[in-house]
Amino acid sequence: MSIQTIFLVLLGAAVFVVGTTNIRAYLRLQKPGNMLSGKVLSAKLVEKRDKEERLIQHYYEMMVQCSGGGKTSHEKISSTTAYEKGDEIKLMRSGSRIVPFTGKSVTFGTALAITLAGMGLAVFPIVYQNSGEKAGSVILVLLLILAGVVSLSSFLKDRGKNLSGLEGEIIDILYYRTGENKKFSKPVESYYPLIRCIVHEKEKIFLSAYNSRTKGTYKAGAKVKLFYDEEQEAIVEKKASPLLAGLAVIFWLLALVGVISIVGG
C-alpha cells in the first residue's frame, strides 16, 4: 500500500469522523429534554493576566435556573459571552454538562453528505487499485457531487438566517499558549479578539471564536462587522461566503466532466 493510499484512507477516516460527530450532535439536539431555557441568577467575570499584562483568561461564571422536560434546576455554567442577572438564554446538554446554545450546527443532510464523502475518500484508492480506473472514476464523481452538496447546503443554511448587521469593537486581545520551549519544538501561540457590541440597546462582550497565530493581526480599538441571528438570539461573526456556492458549481461541473468521461469510455 503506497503512502498516497494510506494518506487518502486516513483523510477519509477523519472526514467520516467529522460527519458522524455532526450527525450525533444533530440527533442530540432533536432529543427531548436536551434543549433548555435558562434565566441567569448571577454572573461573575473571571479574568487573569500574565506577568506581561497580557489577557490570558476571560470568561463568566454563572448560576442559571434551567427549565426543560418539566424539570427545573440550578446549574453552574461557564460562558465566554457576557450575561447579566435576569437575562434569558438558550441552553443545551453536552454530555454531562449544560452549556449555552450557540446556534452553530449543521443540517442532518449536510452531516450525512460529509459522512458519505469520508467513506468515499477512504475506499477510493482501494477501488481504483483493485477494480480499475472506471470504478475509481465513479467513486470520484460521487465525491465531487457530495462536496458540492456540502458547499451549497452550508451556504444556503447561512443565507436562510434572519441576520441583522452590527458593529463591534475589539477591546482587548486574549493570548493563548500551548506547549513549552523545547529543543525541537516551540509553543503554539494564538490571539483571540475580545469584542464589544450593542444588541437591542444592551452591551454584549464576548470572546471571538476566531484566532490568529500572528501577533498584531487584531488591534484594540479596531471596528469589526458582526451580525445578529434574531431566531437563535445569537451573535454571528461571519456570514457564509458566496464562494461556497461557486465552489459547489465547480464541483458539479467537474463531476459532469467525469460522468461524460465514464460514459464515453
Image (cartoon, rainbow, N blue to C red):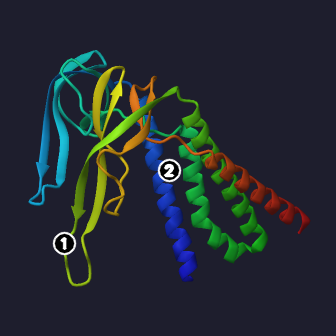
Q: Is residue 109 above or below residue 63?
A: below
Badge 2: how crowded within 10 Å, few (<14), some, or many (20+)? many
Q: Position of residue 181 (x, y in %)?
A: 19, 76
The kind of residue on which mark 2 rests is Gly
SS at mark 2 in the image: helix
Q: Where is residue 73 in the image (x, y as percent from the top left)?
A: 18, 21
Compare residues 263 and 235 and report the one nearer the observer: 235
SS at mark 1 in the image: loop
State left or right for residue 45 relative to residue 171: left
Residue 34 in sight here: no
Q: Mark 2 points at which residue?
A: 19
Residue 207 in sight here: yes
The kind of residue on which mark 1 rests is Glu
Quarter of the image where the N terminus is located: bottom right
State left or right for residue 63 relative to residue 6: left
Q: Residue 180 carries which label?
A: 1
State left or right for residue 123 relative to residue 106: right
The residue furthest right is 264
State left or right for residue 144 relative to residue 173: right
Residue at image location 53% in from the left, 37% down from the top: 107
Quarter of the image where the C terminus is located: bottom right
Compare residues 41 and 207 and report the one nearer the observer: 207
Compare residues 250 and 120 and report the one nearer the observer: 250
Q: Position of residue 68 (x, y in %)?
A: 30, 20
Between disc 1 and disc 2, whose residue precedes? Answer: 2
